[in-house]
Image (cartoon, grey):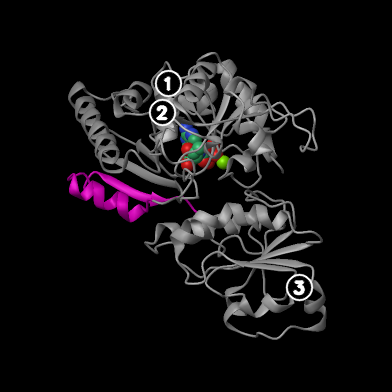
Amino acid sequence: MTFGQTEAESQPVAQLSINISSNKNMSSKAKLIPSTSDSLAQAGERLRAGDLVSFPTETVYGLGCHALDPVAVKKVFQAKERPLTDPLIVHVNNVESALHLWDASSSSSSSSSNKNENENENIQKKTLKALVDRFWPGPLTIVAKASPKVPSIIMANTGFVACRSPSHPIARALIDKSEVPIAAPSANKFGHVSPTKASHVFDDLGMEDVWIVDPSLNDDDAVVDETQTDVIVCDVGVESTVAKVEFVNDSDGIITVLRHGAISSQDIKKCLQDAGLDGQLKIQSKQQATGDNVNHVAPGQTIRHYSPNVQSYMVSHERCIGKKSLSEEEMSIVKNAVIIDFGGRLEFLKENALAYRDLSTNGHSDVAASKVFDTLRWSESIDGAQRVYFPELNIGANDDDALVLAVKDRLTRAASGVVVSTLI
Ligand code: TXA
Ligand code: MG
């Protein structure tokens, strides 16, 4: 996509329409706006009025709306083409706002005595508080029982609401200016690769009525640093860890890690130990798409997510460490394939491939995480690409490098869980 940024930069925010001649699509509705105070104030007003604003966080770009306005929330589902069965995360700037949305005082058992209810309330509140104190602001989303005032559309009628306090200054400034909690899923079309740049959002949502905060448009008065126009966004690069806090009876809680992100189960466990709560809480991880349990699932089945629009496969760990030579048939396939490598595992395909990138030649998971979504989108832009291959990462679910698990999870989903040992 071409943006014509110079043209946009010289315009005031209200005229930043991306309906420019260099853009193929003359009917785009989306607007790019800088992240100056004035611009974010206008974006905040827009959110309060029930319209959509896409903004960067430290993880990925979100597609924001007024979380307590069900009509606005519906617009997000429509713009993303996301099923109403998939709930949204509410973004807040402090624990007080989250406690208004969570119903930390309610018990799941209606027959509890008052004493037990109070104990339960204490444990729930202590648990939420311990997690928030340790990990907020930052990439941890906490799902807990919702207060009755939370619109059910955000929670997909589950009665549990997800809250997160982002650390990125632009996201925080926008929440402040809007003066409302902001519900925001990742700002991609449902099932597509998550966005880490304003251009990614524009590519997916350019036809929607959305403002997109793009700090590269800043000339002065930038929110993060008034002298800096090149503001770093989405530096973590993968979405937040999602942890659900649930009490099955009056005193026993379960924390389920529903999605891998930068904060690991071990980090959560340690936090609860430090708070003296580990005796009352069990921590478990939801079965992830780790490769072992999803091998040979046909493309397009349930775990499909983050998918580039080119057929994608993981090359088995055995092949990565085993046979390096290619059959003639493999050679002809690799010729039209894009390789997204990690730590040089697929280097043996490099010289025959149509295009090749390594997320981190040294195998650094933080670097790989920060690049994974941009690289998946890059693979879609390669002319003539018929296949994308990634290495299968042979990493156990108990590995405590949170980001390597997160990268493995995203690549596994991008390949719909399909692992091949012969390049097909
Ligand atoms: O880093 C992030 O979390 C980004 C940025 C924008 O904050 N947001 C994001 O949102 O990734 P989304 O909607 O793409 O992913 C949210 C995940 C989904 O897997 C959703 O099912 C889960 O969180 N989730 C949200 N609310 C939930 C709830 N009430 N119960 C269980 N899972 C929930
Ligand atoms: Mg998403």
Q: Secondary structure at mark 2?
A: helix
Quarter of the image holding residue 103? top left
Please tell me the numbered disc located at residue 334: 3
Q: Work out which quarter of the rendered image holds the C terminus and state it.
A: bottom right
Give residue 343's position: percent from left, percent from top: 52, 72
Residue 177, numbered circle: 1
Residue occupied by mark 2? 173
Instruction: Give the label, 3 or 1, closer to the camera.
Output: 1
Q: CA distance from mark 2 to mark 1?
A: 6 Å
Q: Which element carries disc 1, helix, strand or loop?
A: helix
Give the distance between the C-alpha atoms of the residues marked 3 and 2, in whole angstroms. Answer: 46 Å
Disc 3 is placed on an element classified as helix
Label 3 residue near ligand 2, CB within 8 Å: no
Question: Is 12 in the magenta?
Answer: no
Look at discs 3 and 2 and give the one toward the viewer: 2
Give amino acid for label 3: Val
Give, as a single range, the part of the protein colored magenta.
263-287
Q: Residue at x 78, y 84 (%)?
A: 327
Instruction: Please tell me which residue is depicted at 35% across the width and 44% down the height of the picture.
Output: 255
Q: Residues within 10 Å of mark 1 (few under 14, many from 20)?
A: some
Residue 331 visible in rendering: yes
